[in-house]
Image (cartoon, coloured by chain):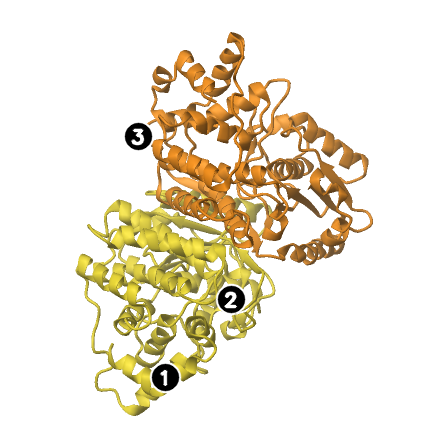
Chain colours: A orange, B yellow
Amino acid sequence: MANILDTGVKLVKNVGRYNIGAGSLAELRGLLDGRRAQALALGQDKSVVFLVDEYFQDHSELSAQLGVQDGDVLQFVETAHEPKTGGIDGVVASLHAQGKGLPSAVVGMGGGITMDTAKAVSNLLGNGGRAADYQGWDLLKQPGVFKVGIPTISGTGAEATRTCVMTNAASGLKLGMNSDFTVFDHVIMDPQLTATVPRNQYFYTGMDAYIHCIESLAGSYRNAIGDAYSRETINLCRQVFGVGDMMTSENRERLMVASFLGGCAIATSYVGLVHPLSAGLSVVLGLHHCVANCIVMRAMGEFYPQAYDEFWGMVDAQGVKIPQGVCAGLDASSFEALYSASIVHAKPLTNALGENFKSRLTPEKVADLFRLM
Amino acid sequence: MANILDTGVKLVKNVGRYNIGAGSLAELRGLLDGRRAQALALGQDKSVVFLVDEYFQDHSELSAQLGVQDGDVLQFVETAHEPKTGGIDGVVASLHAQGKGLPSAVVGMGGGITMDTAKAVSNLLGNGGRAADYQGWDLLKQPGVFKVGIPTISGTGAEATRTCVMTNAASGLKLGMNSDFTVFDHVIMDPQLTATVPRNQYFYTGMDAYIHCIESLAGSYRNAIGDAYSRETINLCRQVFGVGDMMTSENRERLMVASFLGGCAIATSYVGLVHPLSAGLSVVLGLHHCVANCIVMRAMGEFYPQAYDEFWGMVDAQGVKIPQGVCAGLDASSFEALYSASIVHAKPLTNALGENFKSRLTPEKVADLFRLM
């Protein structure tokens, strides 16, 4: 296969270390104590920057749980919108204004938005410049600040991947800092943290892991390790969403593992048709990534028939609601915009449909698909 | 569960980076060039120490493939016997005698014996002292030399684990340097390297991955991530050994992945009954670990009935030979020695049979099991 997908030998950077298990958040303080002591010994800034999902803003015990000390920065990350390069630059500027040039660690605690923000901020603290400078592949020159990821919702795999997705509002480019330096040094997976996630959101986000893996296993680009991670991610999702309550403590731990392994799968494979169409919904209609994926599944019966049936079976089993009719009443220019924002993703579309994907995905066909959503 | 297995929260160190795919050995030179340049920039020794399975001694193209330069050390590792602490000390002494105090990298290319030797040598170069000083848990104080693992046979998981098994001839203790510092910084998984492995050895070693995972999934100590790695390792082994030739290029890549993921599984779980009895065969009869595991499977019908059937089905499917009658004619003191060397492994035996494992594994019962082998 000599096409745009064929990179032959794969080089993969793993998350450095991880803690896993209920209660493992308590391990954070000791970890940070070590970083602080090391910084002190070198005459460096021992402070820690905590970037936390705004959901936790009212949790009075949070500072104590995280071990926030004098001189640290605890900043809440808005999650109404997905990260923008300007917003990342703003966080970095505010840290510089507080004298945080090179803290001893950056902690990102939250969902994909918050973890991606922490990854990007760490990179910028270590490399200087602005977020837009590093949108692309391997543009970072050196490591960022030591960074810890603590997912509080499972599915995106942001805790395991080498990217941090962000949109450049000026150019419209939605692209992360793809780099080994973007990978977390440490991840803490504590399933107690996902106990209070709203059920619909829990489902949408968990399905990000499932959908990625059904896409990669159905694609033309395959390899043994990507397949292995994908298969087991799907297996875990079936255990979680198939029958019974998806939010038992066992299932929350399983979904945390599925998210992590799904992220490992992403590192060695490509997605397919769902993610490009989902990106269209995000760019044009502002829908968040995970719910957009689920909406796209309304139109996937023709392309992924088995996964389509399984997906809607899980929706029924868990009694969750997937938005419907999101493209109803859109005008022709909106459908054109949806087409453009989807068809640009040549690699996953090639993986799903071959190099001539545009002959199957005509503007009319794509509009019909969006009308099904 | 409040027993010797219950460590609650788990902390796991991953392999830093890995290459995977046919031909990926060619990536080694560039990787080492980077290490050499970095050492030179710091005014340090830029040389590399290559520890290679003696099997490759007659491969004339080896030095060129590995990128061996003037000043490097290329040393072949004997694999007739599993590593001993004295042997590790001897390698380190010979490196010191050649002025290799802190080379820029140590490369271990071979099976479990060679990779474990490289891990131990790297640790000793970084920490000083003798190998026996670090047999145990978390006794190393600092990182060793940057180390690269290149498996040339698949199954042990040595490329992924935080230990390097070695026997202290003086004390009889078979125990590794269990430490985060023992984990490889980089692993290169090139399935072309396993094309010439003898079929029986390929099977025995591959089964190390399978057997570990059937043991851990049948144990009382379980967690979501260990289970996930174990399930997928078994799945891959079924693909490789179930039907068809186990040594096609696709199956060699699959088994390389199974070995790696099996190693990841080991990091968060315990083995069961096979490994303790296998250790008995190794200590008393000098049988190598992987073939010893397969021999023990002769006696496992009572304990792991499903895996027993599957294992012997795979033996038949692949037409390999498992030694038989290895304990025939042993005297009473040998059976006592086998019992002692097996029953000492309290953690896996507790995992398999509960805290009262000795009530089921009486000396008579254990002798009966060995007689089945």
List x then y, in percent, for residue B234: 34, 55
**Residue underneath mark 1:** B339
- Does A18 appear above or below A12? below
- The residue depicted at 76 percent of the width and 48 percent of the height is A47
Q: For the N terminus of chain A, which image quadrant?
A: top left
Q: What secondary structure is marked by label 2?
A: strand
Select label 1 or label 2 by which is in front.
1
Image quadrant in which you'd find residue B29: top left
Q: Are marks 2 and 3 in contact (CB under 8 Å)?
A: no
Q: Is residue B160 visible?
A: no
Q: Residue beneath label 2, please?
A: B178
Q: Are marks 1 and 2 in contact (CB under 8 Å)?
A: no
Query: Residue beneath label 3, please?
Result: A1
- Say few, some or many: other residues with alpha carbon within 10 Å of mark 3 (under 14 / 14 to 19 / 20 or more): few
Residue at the spot 21% in from the left edge and 72% down from the top edge: B323
Separation of marks 2 and 3 at Cα, in angstroms: 43 Å
Residue A262 visible in the picture: yes
> Looking at the image, which residue is at 25% across and 72% down?
B298
| Image position of B350 (left or right of B235) | right
Q: Nearer the viewer, residue A335 or B262?
A: A335
Q: Residues within 10 Å of mark 1 (few under 14, many from 20)?
A: many
The kind of residue on which mark 2 rests is Asn
Query: Which chain contains the residue that carries disc 3?
Result: A
Q: Position of residue B143 (x, y in %)?
A: 57, 59
Residue B168: x and y, percent? 44, 77
